[in-house]
C-alpha cells in the first residue's frame, strides 16, 4: 500500500525538459490514483458488511436436514 | 445440516470481501450476490475438503473465481470480452452499479481482458500476495505478475486519455453547441 494522495505529485515538479521523464512521472501518478480508486471502490463494498440474505442462507442450511445442494460435482478448489 | 460454528463464522466473515471481488469481476451487484450465494453453497457442501489452518478466504475466492469463469464461459463461449459485451452490459445497467464516482474506473476495468482484471483485483484491491493470487487463479506467479503489470499499464493508458480529454475543450459545451448547430 502506498499512501499517495490523488493529484499530489510524488516528486517535486521538475523543469519540463525531458518529456519522456514527464510521461513516466505522469503515468506513475495515474497508476497511484487508479490503485487508490480501485481499493476505495472495493472497500466501499466490503464496508457494506454481510447482507441479511447471506446470514439467512446459513441459518436455512443449518435448519435443514439436507446437505446444501451442490449442482456441480467438481470441487471448487481446483484451477 | 450441522455446520462447525468456527467454519460458519469464517465463511460469513469472508462474505463482504467475496462480494467486493464478485462485483469487481462482474460489474453487476445482483449477479455478484448470486455468485456469492452459490460460492457459499458450494463451500459448505465441500467443507470437508477445506484444510483447517489454511486460508479460508483464499479457498472461498478460488471457488468464486472458478464459478465465475465457468459461468462466463457458458454465457459468452469465450473467456475474453473481445466484443465488449461485458462493457455493454455494464452501461445498460447503471442503476445496479452503486457509485457514480467509480464509473470511469469501472468502464476501464470492463475493457480489460478477464484474466488481467481478475489479477489486478486480487493483488491491487483484495490484498492477496502474488503467490496467493496465483493459487486462486490456478497459474504461475510470473503469469500473475505480468497480468497485473499489463492491467495497470492499460488502465493508466485508458484513464490518462480520459483525463486528457477532460482537460481539453469542454466536451459538454461542445456537445450542446454541436447539437444546436446541427439541428
Image (cartoon, coloured by chain):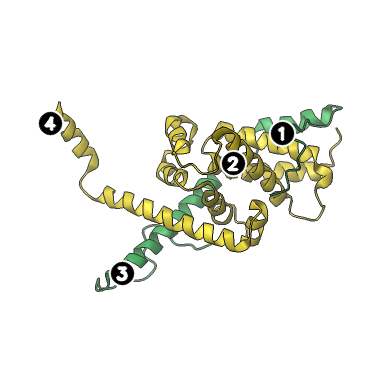
Chain colours: A green, B yellow
Q: Nearer the viewer, mark 1 or mark 3?
A: 3
* Chain letter, disc 4 residue: B
Q: Could you tell me residue B44's position as x and y percent?
A: 78, 38
Residue A69 vertical position relative to residue B9 in the rendered view, above or below:
above
Residue at 37% from the left image edge and 51% from the top image edge: B159
Residue B22: numbered disc: 2
Rendering quarter of residue B102: top left
Disc 4 on helix, strand or loop?
A: helix
Check disc 2: other Cα within 10 Å, few if <14, some if 14-19, many if 20+. Answer: many
Both marks 1 and 4 on one chain? no
Q: Nearer the viewer, mark 3 or mark 2?
A: 3
Q: Could you tell me residue B167's position as x and y percent?
A: 25, 51
Pick whichever, B125 or A75, lies toward us.
A75
Residue B151 visible in image = yes
Pick whichever, B145 or B38, lies toward us.
B145
Both marks 2 and 4 on one chain? yes
Check disc 4: other Cα within 10 Å, few if <14, some if 14-19, many if 20+. Answer: few
Using residue B108 as the reference point, say whether residue A76 is left or right of it.
Answer: right
Check disc 3: other Cα within 10 Å, few if <14, some if 14-19, many if 20+. Answer: few
Residue at 46% from the left image edge and 46% from the top image edge: B109
Disc 1 on helix, strand or loop?
A: helix
Both marks 2 and 1 on one chain? no
Amino acid at each position: 500500500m502506498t499512501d499517495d494522495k490523488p493529484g499530489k505529485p510524488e516528486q517535486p515538479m521538475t523543469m519540463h525538459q525531458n518529456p519522456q521523464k514527464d510521461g513516466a512521472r505522469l503515468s506513475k501518478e495515474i497508476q497511484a490514483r487508479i490503485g487508490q480508486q480501485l481499493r476505495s471502490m472495493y472497500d466501499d463494498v466490503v464496508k457494506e458488511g454481510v447482507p441479511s440474505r447471506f446470514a439467512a442462507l446459513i441459518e436455512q442450511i443449518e435448519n435443514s436436514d439436507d446437505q446444501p445442494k451442490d449442482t456441480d460435482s467438481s470441487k471448487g478448489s481446483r484451477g | 445440516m450441522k455446520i462447525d460454528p468456527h467454519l460458519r463464522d469464517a465463511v460469513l466473515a469472508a462474505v463482504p470481501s467475496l462480494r467486493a471481488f464478485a462485483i469487481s469481476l462482474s460489474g453487476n451487484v445482483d449477479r455478484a450476490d448470486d455468485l456469492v450465494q452459490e460460492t457459499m453453497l458450494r463451500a459448505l457442501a465441500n467443507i470437508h475438503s477445506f484444510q483447517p489452518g489454511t486460508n479460508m478466504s483464499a479457498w472461498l475466492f478460488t471457488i468464486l473465481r472458478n464459478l465465475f469463469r465457468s459461468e462466463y464461459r457458458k454465457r459468452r463461449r469465450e473467456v475474453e470480452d473481445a466484443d465488449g459485451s461485458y462493457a455493454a452490459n455494464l452501461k445498460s445497467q447503471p442503476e445496479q452499479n452503486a457509485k457514480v464516482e467509480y464509473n470511469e474506473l469501472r468502464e476501464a476495468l470492463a475493457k480489460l481482458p478477464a484474466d488481467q482484471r481478475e489479477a489486478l483485483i486480487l493483488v491491487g484491491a483484495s490484498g492477496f500476495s502474488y503467490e496467493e493470487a496465483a493459487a486462486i487463479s490456478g497459474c504461475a506467479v510470473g503469469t500473475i505478475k505480468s497480468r497485473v503489470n499489463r492491467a495497470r499499464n492499460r488502465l493508466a493508458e485508458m484513464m490518462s486519455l480520459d483525463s486528457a480529454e477532460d482537460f481539453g475543450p469542454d466536451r459538454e459545451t461542445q456537445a450542446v453547441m454541436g447539437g444546436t448547430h446541427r439541428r
